[in-house]
Image (cartoon, rainbow, N blue to C red):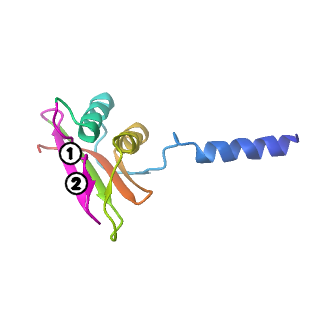
Amino acid sequence: MKTSTIFYSLVALITVSPETVMAGCFSGGVDWQDRGAARWHIERACKGYDGKQGAFQGWFNPGQAKSACVQHSGTQKFDFFVQNLNTGAGFDLGDNDCVLRLQNIVNGCSKGGQDDIAGWRFRADPNNGIC
């Protein structure tokens, strides 16, 4: 196999890797005070906790958006947002997909960001203030 063929094959694999963060990161605002805490709250919002349904579990009607605000500290809140961009059909977003997409934003964007993928909009944003 030629060196150029190997190189282009590696580029193609990296480009389609499901772990690649493709979020549109925000350039303004504040940084996450604690990314680990943000990821933990995303897990709860997407999968539920203590027998309670998470904010992003269940059916999304066409175009429906759901949001969750978590008070992280006295000076920072975490705003999470998920929207079904399909205006003709409702869907139930998979819990693991929800976690993956929101956590990708937290991991890859120091000031939060937004990602539109597969008919869904995901946004995770650290903000000053109180919920």
The magenta stretch spans which residues?
A: 51-74
The residue type indicated by label 2 comes to Lys
Q: Is residue 33 shown to the viewer in this render? A: no
Magenta segment includes 60: yes
Residue 119, can we see it? yes
Asked whether residue 99 is drawn in magenta, I would say no
Q: Are marks 2 and 1 in contact (CB under 8 Å)?
A: yes
Q: Which residue is mark 2?
A: 66
**Residue at 44%, 50% in the rendered image:** 23
Total number of numbered discs in the rendering: 2
The C terminus sits in image quarter: top left
Q: Which residue is mark 1?
A: 55
Residue 58 in percent (x, y) is at 25, 49
In which quarter of the view is residue 65 placed?
Answer: bottom left
**Given the current orientation, which residue lies at the most extreme bottom position?**
88
Figure quadrant of the N terminus: top right
Kindly report the secondary structure that dominates the magenta region of the rendered protein. Answer: loop
Find residue 61 and report its horizontal and vertical position in percent: 26, 62
Q: CA distance from mark 2 to mark 1?
A: 7 Å
